[in-house]
Image (tube, grey):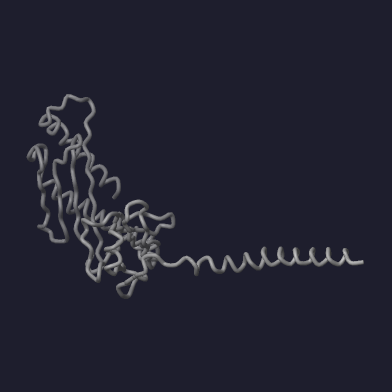
Amino acid sequence: MYDTVVNHMFSSLQIRTPYLKEQCNSTDEIQVYQRIVGCELLDTVDSGEMKGWDSFNGLLIGTMSTNMEPDSLQFKIERFGVYGLNLEVSKWNTKYVYYPFCIKTLKRFLEEEKNRVKKKVKPRVRLVKKTLAGTGRIQVTCLATGFYPRHINLTLLRDGQSVSEDQITGGILLPNVDDTYQMRKSLEVKAQEFRLHNYSCSVVHLSLDNKLDIAFDHDANPSMVPIWWPFLVVLFVLVIVPVAGFIIWRRCAGVGVARP
């Protein structure tokens, strides 16, 4: 079946190339004709939509779309009309060759990779703030990482209302080394504005039963004493106490020797 699909595709590209070369007035010895075709497999039905794109020498020249309905096949010619394109042959190839092969291939991959494809990993979400030195501004960042599948709805909120996207930076989905994903969104505000509002982060993901809301304490400058206090206690016990004891011992020893 694979050989049949490749042969059909190569033949159609080969037949149409001279027409497209003429329309482009191309004199180059090397012509680049590209076609990409993809389909989707849905849970509720046997198959979903199928789409294809053709380009010649870097120019999009046509698109194709279809679904389960037999008469749903549509071609949209972007450039050069239908030169070298036999619509009836293309419809037959799509309906009886490309479409069945694409769905069959997806089903096979789904069976082989179902444990990985259908896994769900909950995101680890943090809401952090950072003072930007010399600007008097604070950056509020919502970070979600370690989640799968890749689709996630990450929203920064001000007093419970979504912050406008034009004020937010980031929002790009990035892969992790363990096949999970991460996304972060950041907002910069004046320090005074930060103190006047409550900022939070909302996350919706397939792995979560309910929407996850994350917030932090509104104290923009938390005291560092709770962080350093355990360190100071340990330092006092391990260093200061032994040194003080050694000094006292030396003094006592010296006084004892000086007595008649």
Residue at 30%, 73% (x, y): give it: 211
With respect to residue 153, does 91 lie above or below? Answer: above
Relative side of 209 to 60, left or right: right
With respect to residue 164, does 34 lie above or below? Answer: above
Relative side of 252 to 103, left or right: right
Q: Between 48 and 179, which is closer to the camera in this rendering? A: 179
With respect to residue 221, does 132 lie above or below? Answer: above
Count of marks overlaid on the render: 0
Q: Is residue 53 visible?
A: yes
- Residue 161: quarter of image: bottom left
Relative side of 242 to 2, left or right: right
Residue 183 image position (x, y, % from top left): 33, 58
Furthest residue in direction bottom, as rendered: 209
Q: Is residue 203 visible?
A: no
Residue 150 image position (x, y, % from top left): 32, 60
Residue 39 image position (x, y, % from top left): 23, 55
Residue 240 image position (x, y, % from top left): 67, 64
Furthest residue in direction right, as rendered: 260
Q: Between 99 and 189, which is closer to the camera in this rendering? A: 189
Furthest residue in direction front, as rendered: 260
Residue at 10%, 43% (x, y): give it: 78
- Residue 6: quarter of image: top left
Q: Between 169 and 63, which is closer to the camera in this rendering? A: 169
Relative side of 100 to 124, left or right: left
Residue at 16%, 41% (x, y): give it: 60
> From the image, which quarter does the C terminus lie in?
bottom right
- Residue 190: quarter of image: bottom left
Residue at 56%, 69% (x, y): give it: 230
